[in-house]
Image (spheres, rainbow, N blue to C red):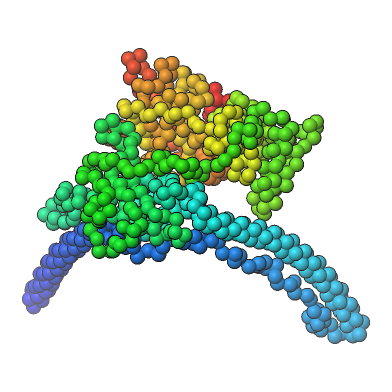
Amino acid sequence: MSRRAGSGLIGNWAEAQRRQQQTQLIQQREAERRQRAYERDANRSHRQYREAEALRRTAQLDAEVTALKGLLVAGCRAPAFRISDLARPDRLEPFNPGALAQPVPMPRIEDFQRQSSGWTLGSNHRAQAEREAHARYTQAWQAANAAEAQRQQQLAAYRQQYDRWAAEQLAGVRAHNGGLTELADALRAGDAEAAVEYFSAALYASTAWPEALPRQVAAAYDPAARQLVLDWELPGYAVVPEARAVQYLPSTDQDKVKPRPVTERRALYRDLLAQCVLLVVRELYAADEFGVLDSVVVNGFVDCHDPVTGQEARFVLSTVPAERSAFAGLRLEQVSAVDCLVSGLGGQLSARPDQLTAVRPGRRPDEVGGGVVSHGGHGGGTDDDEPDLFVMDPIAFENLVAELFRAMGMEAVTTQRSGDGGVDVEAVDPAPIRGGRIVVQVKRYRNTVPPTAVRDLYGTVQDKGANKGVLVTTASFGPGSYTFANGKPLELVPGADLVELLHQYGLRGRLGGGSAAAPARRAPEPEPAPPADHNVLGMSWSGSVALDVCALVCTGNRVLSEDHFVFFNNPRTPDGSVRSREHARPDKAALEVSFDALPSQADRLVLVAAIDPEVDPRADLAGFADAHIRLLSAGGEELGRLDVSDGRAGETALVLGSFRRRSNGDWDFVIGGKGYRGGLEALLGEYGVEVA
C-alpha cells in the first residue's frame, strides 16, 4: 500500500512538472510571438513615419515652387500703398494708475466697538474697553488717512508724468503726420527727394513681397522726364529648390533626394526674375496716388562673389523701361512674365541668370541729372552759407552745440568759461524714463580725440551726478575711446555725425572746404577691395551669451596701431587685410583675413572675445562653451576646425588664440585661454591700446 501511495505521489509530481514545463514553453512561445509582432509593428511604424516624412518634405518643395511661380499673381492682389499707410494714430494708451486708483479703506468705529463687546464684567471694565477700542480706532484712522494722502500724492505725480508723456507722444504723432502732409505737397510739386522717399517707402512696406526675398533699392527721380529710376535687388539662384522630391528607400533605411532637372530649375529662376521686375513696376504705379510718374526704369541686380575673381560684385540680370501708357493695358495675372517683360515692354532678361550672365543696364540712378537730389541729401547753399566749424570762434561753437540740443527738444545752456568743472553745455532731456540731466563737452579738434578725454568726461558725469555725458568734436575717436565708452552712460559724436545732425535740425556747419550742397558726412577714403586669396574665420559657441569677436594685428604683444584693432567701430585694418564680415550659419561671428597681405612687421593675429555690456551688463563668460573656429577658404570650403578654450564665471573677456608667423612664412594657430574680469578694456591694455 505504501509503495502504491508513494508511486502515486511521484507520478503526480512528475505530471505537475510536465504541465509546468508545458506552461513555461507556451509562455515563452507567446512572448516570442508578441516580440515578433512588436518588431513587425515597430518596423511598419518606422517605415510609415519615414515615408510620411519624405512625403511632407516633397510637399514642402512643391509649395515653395508653387509660391515662386505665383509671385506675380499673388502680388497683384496686394493692396496699393498709400501715404495714409504711414500715418500714426493719435490714440494713446489711457491713463491706468493700477492700484493707485483704489482709495485706502478707512476704518469704522463699529468694528472696533464690536471687538470690545466681550467686556461685560461691570461698568468700569466696559468703559475701559470702549476707551481702548476708540484709541485703536483713532490710531488706525490716522494711519489710513496718512496712507490715503500718500496715495493721492503718488497718483497726482503719476498723472503729471503720464500727461507729460502723452503730450510728448501726441506732439510726435502730429509732427509725423504733419510731415506726411508736407511730403504729399512736395510730391505734387514734383520734388525729387520727396519722390525717392515716398516710392522707396512704398516698396519697403509692400505686402506683395514674401519676407524671404530681398528689398534693397537705390533710386533717383527725374522731375523733367517724370521718371523714377531705380536699382532693385533680385533673389539669388539658390531661391529655387535644388531638390525636386524626397523618396524613402526601405531596403537601405535612407532617404533618396531626387534632384530637380537643371533645365527646369533654370527656367523657374528666369521666370521668377521676370516676375520680380514686373511686380516692382506694378507696385510703383499702384502707389502713385499723386500722378507723378510717366515712366519708370528698373534694373534688377544680384550681389554675389564673382566666379572669375572671387570678389564681391554686382550683376544686372534684367532691366526694363516701362511707360505708364504701355503698362496700364497689361493684365499681369494672365501674362507670361518672361514674354511680357521682353516682348511686351521691350526689356532685357539674362539668358543664363544662373551663370550670372549680365545684361546691359538701362538708365542708372547715379546717371539722373537735372539737379535731382538723392534720397537723404541736402540741397542748396554755398560755402559762405555754411560756417567752417574748424575755424569758428570757440564760444560760437559751444553756442551752436547748445542750439543743436535745443532743436532736438531739450533745454540747454552754455556754462561760464571759468569754473565749469569740465562742462561746456548743460542740457536736460524732459523725456520720461530715458531723459534726465546731460553734461556736454565740446572739443574743436582736427586730430583724433585721445581716450583720456573720454575718461575725463566719465569722471565728470559721476562727479556731477548726471544721467549721461556727451562728447562732441569736429574730429574723430579711436578704438580705445569707443571701447571705454561701451556700456557706460556716454555718447561720442564725431565731426561727420555732428554735421549731419546740424543739417537734420535745420542748422548750418561744415568741416573744412567743400560745397555745402554735398552730403553732410565727409567722403570716406576708398575702401580697398578684399584680396582674392583670403580666408574666413567663422566663430561658433554654445549658449546664448552675446559676444563681440575682435582681432588685433600685433608685433609680439603690441598692436601695430589703434587702426589695426578690428572691432564693431573699426570694421577693417587700413590695408584691408583683416575685416569684419557678415556671418552665416552655423557661425555666430566671422572675420576675413588675408594672411599674405598682413603687414610685414606683424608676426601674430590675436583673436579675442568680450561680453557685449549693452545686451546684458551682468553677463559673464560662464555660458561660453563648446567654442571653435571654422577655417574656410574664400569659396566657403571648410579647411579645418580650431578649438578654443571655454569661458569662466566672472570673466568678461577672453583671448581665443593667435595665428603666429613662422620663419618659413607659414601661420600656425596657438590656442589662448587667458581671461579678464575687467572686460575688453583690461585685455586691450595688455596689447598697448589706450583705453583708460
Q: Residue at x 40, y 36 (%)?
A: 581
Q: At which x and y percent is residue 146?
A: 81, 67
Please state which of residues 60 and 256 is positioned toward the viewer in this rendering. 60
Please state which of residues 565 and 316 is positioned toward the viewer in this rendering. 316
Name the quadrant of the N terminus.
bottom left
Whether residue 370 can be seen here? yes
Q: Residue furthest right?
A: 124
Q: Quadrant of residue 539?
A: top left
- Locate residue 206 relative to residue 455 in the image: left or right: left
- Locate residue 299 relative to residue 564 in the image: left or right: left
Q: Residue at x 31, y 49 (%)?
A: 320
- Locate residue 515 relative to residue 126 in the image: left or right: left
Name the quadrant of the C terminus.
top right
Q: Is residue 384 above or below residue 359?
A: above
Q: At which x and y percent is residue 21?
A: 12, 67
Q: Is residue 312 above or below residue 293?
A: above
Please state which of residues 163 and 506 is positioned toward the viewer in this rendering. 506
Q: At which x and y percent is residue 287?
A: 42, 59
Please state which of residues 309 and 60 is positioned toward the viewer in this rendering. 309
Q: Residue at x 70, y 70 (%)?
A: 101
